């Protein structure tokens, strides 16, 4: 039997719902967790994805008030739903970002985050790939230069990933973190889209 995309998604969500115990999950967080599991087919995120209090409502309020979404990769920017007219910004591939990163001998992700913070210190920040971007953002938060409406800290990998997430978790900012090595652009995209779908 051939199913339409919306039917596949509906059935997938039904399977996920039947497989989890959501009795201790705050209702506002559940759609985000389910969408991440749907995107990754990985039930570990039920336990490793954590939310600071009111992270989802605070993010939605900021987006309704026209806060942009800052991403660390163009792939993440491309995957975010455009139906809500949210401004999505990623400076990582800009020519001046590339030139500055080369001249300073640092990653483009760091320069990209620095530029975004100088423009939109109170934006929603979504980092799914580059731990260096998350570390730099945390440093700017500590210095009072960034006051994000939400930080989605879900970089994937083995080098500085766990350390970056621990740094974010030590800060008093709205945050969603995938603890451990797992994460990635797919996870960050699922989280943002779940937040946006809740605006309807």
Image (spheres, helix red, strand yellow):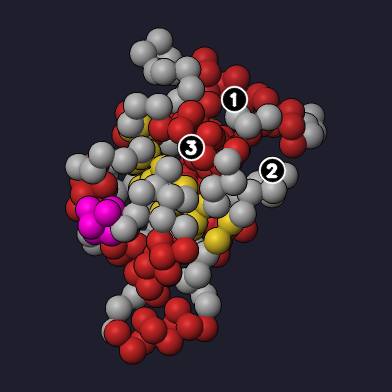
Residue 119 among magenta residues: no
Marks 1/3: CA–CA distance? 23 Å
| Between 4 and 183, the one nearer to me in the picture | 183
Picture residue at 45% right of the left edge, 25% below the top: 29
Q: Secondary structure at mark 3?
A: helix
Which label lies toward us, 2 or 1? 2
Q: Secondary structure at mark 1?
A: helix
Marks 3/2: CA–CA distance? 14 Å
Residue 171, above or below 1: below
Q: Which mark is residue 59?
A: 3
Q: Is residue 37 visible?
A: no
Q: Quadrant of residue 134?
A: bottom left
Label 3: few (<14), some or many (≥20) within 10 Å? many
Q: Secondary structure at mark 2?
A: loop
Q: Quadrant of residue 102?
A: bottom left
| Between 16 and 29, the one nearer to me in the picture | 29
Residue 96, above or below 176: below
Residue designated by label 2: 84
Which label lies toward us, 1 or 3? 3
Picture residue at 22% right of the left edge, 53% below the top: 142
Residue 141 among magenta residues: yes
Residue 87's spot in the image, x, y percent?
Answer: 61, 54
Of the two numbered discs 3 and 2 on the same chain, state the one appearing first in sequence. 3
- Numbered disc total: 3
Residue designated by label 1: 13
Q: Which residues are magenta?
A: 139-144
Of the two numbered discs 2 and 1 on the same chain, state the one appearing first in sequence. 1
| Between 196 and 155, the one nearer to me in the picture | 196
Residue 5's spot in the image, x, y percent?
Answer: 74, 36
């Amino acid at each position: 039997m051939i199913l339409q995309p919306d039917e596949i998604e509906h059935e997938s969500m039904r399977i996920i719902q039947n497989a989890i115990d959501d009795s201790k999950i705050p209702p506002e967080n559940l759609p985000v967790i389910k969408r991440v599991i749907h995107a990754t087919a990985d039930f570990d995120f039920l336990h490793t994805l954590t939310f600071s209090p009111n992270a989802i409502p605070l993010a939605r309020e900021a987006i309704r008030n026209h806060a942009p979404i800052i991403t660390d990769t163009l792939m993440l920017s491309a995957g975010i739903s455009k139906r809500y007219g949210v401004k999505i910004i990623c400076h990582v591939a800009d020519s001046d970002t590339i030139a500055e990163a080369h001249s300073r001998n640092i990653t483009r992700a760091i320069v990209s985050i620095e530029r975004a913070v100088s423009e939109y210190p109170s934006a929603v920040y979504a980092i799914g790939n580059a731990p260096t971007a998350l570390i730099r953002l945390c440093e700017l938060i500590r210095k009072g230069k960034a006051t994000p409406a939400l930080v989605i800290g879900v970089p994937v990998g083995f080098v500085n990933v766990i350390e970056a997430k621990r740094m974010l978790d030590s800060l008093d900012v709205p945050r969603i973190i995938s603890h451990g090595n797992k994460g990635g652009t797919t996870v960050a995209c699922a989280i943002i889209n779940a937040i946006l779908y809740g605006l309807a």
